Image (spheres, rainbow, N blue to C red):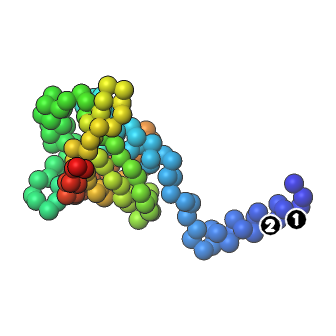
Amino acid sequence: MSRVAVATVWVVLALAAREGFTAPAPTDAIRAAWSELDAAWAARDLERMVRLFADEAVFAFPPGDYRLDGKPAIRAHFAAQFPKQSPALRHVTEVGHIRPVGDGLYAVDAGVRVVRTADDGAELSVLRAFAVFALMRAREQGWELLEVRAFRLPDEPEAR
């Protein structure tokens, strides 16, 4: 690398540091955490899923008052729900916007669908759909969910 190129890199780095430059959101890692959540839900693997939540996590379903405070409440909720669910149901998340909102904190907007699938994995129907807002933070083992708000969307009319 030429001296001019090295000098240019140093100037850019110095200006970025002086201007309070922050690195872009680690979108691939955050999307991977949501994929892990989908896989854990599909496998009905309670411990694998709960590991993705912070100890103090909140999982809420506005506009009502249904709210799970802390990892034990989240674990208890899904421990009761998973045995009731058909193995043909899948949890499908589409992560939208990811935005830094504080030191190591990221806001995530996503859509989640609970879908019924055929034996070959093809989607047959959407059972429920949610608009989701989440607050996530990095930890040594990956990303964790601090707060999740899942807003149920109106059911789509069936095609005739």
Task: Identify the disc placed on residue 4.
Answer: 1
Q: Is residue 138 above or below residue 90?
A: below
Bin the neighbour count of mark 2 within 10 Å (Cα to Cα): few under 14, some 14-19, many 20 and up: few
Please report the residue visible at 50 percent of the width from the left and 57 percent of the height from the top.
25
Q: Quadrant of residue 2?
A: bottom right
Q: Nearer the viewer, residue 44 or 19?
A: 44
Amino acid type, mark 1: Val
Bin the neighbour count of mark 1 within 10 Å (Cα to Cα): few under 14, some 14-19, many 20 and up: few
x and y, in percent, of residue 100 in the image: 45, 62
Q: Nearer the viewer, residue 41 or 26?
A: 41
On screen, residue 124 versus residue 27, left or right, reads left
Q: Nearer the viewer, residue 47 or 13?
A: 47
Q: Quadrant of residue 143?
A: top left
x and y, in percent, of residue 76 in the image: 14, 37
x and y, in percent, of residue 159 in the image: 25, 50
Amino acid type, mark 2: Thr
Q: Quadrant of residue 98?
A: bottom left
Q: Helix, strand or loop at disc 2?
A: helix
Q: Is residue 18 above or below residue 106?
A: below
Task: Identify the disc placed on residue 8.
Answer: 2
On screen, residue 6 versus residue 29, left or right, reads right
Work out whether residue 87 can be spotted.
Answer: yes
Q: Is residue 74 above or below residue 97?
A: above
Label 1, label 2: how far apart the Cα atoms are:
6 Å
Residues tagged 1 and 2 counted as in contact (Cβ below 8 A): yes
Please report the residue visible at 19 percent of the width from the left and 30 percent of the height from the top.
86
Q: Residue furthest right?
A: 2
x and y, in percent, of residue 96 in the image: 41, 57
- Name the quarter where the N terminus is drawn: bottom right
